[in-house]
Image (spheres, coloured by chain):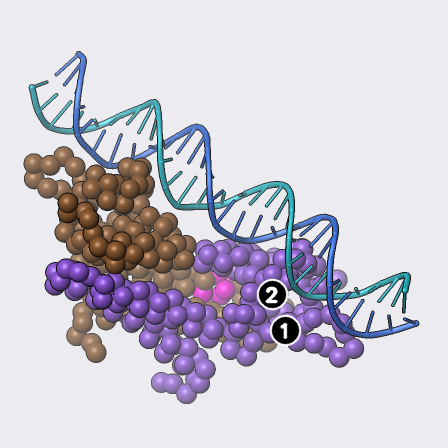
Chain colours: A brown, B purple, C cyan, D blue
Amino acid sequence: MADNRNAAADHFVESMGLHFEADGMPRIAGRILGLFILEGGPLSFAVLAERLKISRASVSTNTRLLAEMGVIERTTVSGERQDYFRMADSPYVCLLHKMADRADKAARMTDQAVAGLVESDPDVRRRLGAFSEFQRAIATSAKRLANSIRNPAKH
Amino acid sequence: MADNRNAAADHFVESMGLHFEADGMPRIAGRILGLFILEGGPLSFAVLAERLKISRASVSTNTRLLAEMGVIERTTVSGERQDYFRMADSPYVCLLHKMADRADKAARMTDQAVAGLVESDPDVRRRLGAFSEFQRAIATSAKRLANSIRNPAKH
DNA sequence: AGGTCCGTTCAGTGTTGACTAAACGGAGTT
DNA sequence: AACTCCGTTTAGTCAACACTGAACGGACCT
């Protein structure tokens, strides 16, 4: 049967699950992405549930999560009632944007703290500024990487 | 009293806790780092517990976590039996290294999957290669950023 | 020795969140 | 209409883990 994948593929799917989990995301979302990297082509809702041995509810939740992140896209197949999914054109760019957003948020939060300080100890401002700069550096670095992926005219 | 900080400072400490929690780390670790950014100077074990209103057990666990990450360092004060902690010289570089390590690990994991494939569908190899490249790009980007922080002789 | 001040470890608690099963609603088919 | 095939939502379960209190052990002082 076609789903009798070899051990390396299974291990990859599982590792992607753990990698996602270490990132604070649902393990199943990682497994789904892993399966798409391996299988590529559009996969149906039902196939995802069957291949990964997960409930339809988990498929629904995690496909939506991945779709909102921009990693996969929902498609349809003519003559089919089922939903199908396929990888987005630039599946990884959105992950970088997400990283950049989080860092930007932390930077803004820090700047807000600086603005709200009553005291003016220069050391405090310096340390807060250093952290804010650090977060902004992460954000710009992630954005730059995202752009270089979008148009590979760089090198 | 000296610990009657203003609201902005308290809010910053709490926000750092949430920021860390969103990263999959203990909330208390973030609060401790936030307090160090604000207070700077060496803080004693007991002061950390008192200021943040957390148990000594939590202080023990999370200071060790931050120390292992390289964000803070354990110090001593002459004539004092208590442990003291202060921010490391480059507190944020280690965070970048940690990020780089995770990406490198994912890249290696992916390459391992490629090596273990029995089939040779070029599309599968291409997609796996793209993901591996993506992770390696993150790793090198993080390392570059770490270096630029270490010696700001850049740009 | 006893006593005090430390930090760590361990058992227990509480909470968060992923995951599931079942109920639900919508759309197509008969 | 009733029926079937979908995907979503919701209530509930389960496991992981942060956090605490208490017991522990080590170091210093008397």
Residue occupying the point 10% across, 42% down: A77
Disc 1 and disc 2 in contact, CB within 8 angstroms: yes
Q: Position of residue D18 (x, y in %)?
A: 55, 53
Residue in the foreground of this view, choosing between A25 and A140: A25
Q: Position of residue A25 (x, y in %)?
A: 38, 52
Numbered badge on residue B148 = none
Give the labeled residue for mark 2. B63
Span shown in magenta: A107-112
Amino acid marked by disc 1: Arg
Dot 1 falls on a residue whose secondary structure is: strand
Disc 1 crowd rating (10 Å Cα; few below 14, some 14-19, many 20+) is some
Asked if both marks, 1 and 2, belong to the same chain, the answer given is yes
Disc 2 crowd rating (10 Å Cα; few below 14, some 14-19, many 20+) is many
Amino acid marked by disc 2: Thr
A84 is higher (above) or lower (below) than D9: below
Residue B122 highlighted magenta (yes or no) = no
Quarter occupied by residue C23 = top left
Residue occupying the point 17% across, 54% down: A40
Dot 2 falls on a residue whose secondary structure is: helix
Quadrant of the snapshot with the C terminus of chain A: bottom left
Q: Is residue A120 visible?
A: no
Residue in the foreground of this view, choosing between A79 and A122: A79
Give the labeled residue for mark 1. B74
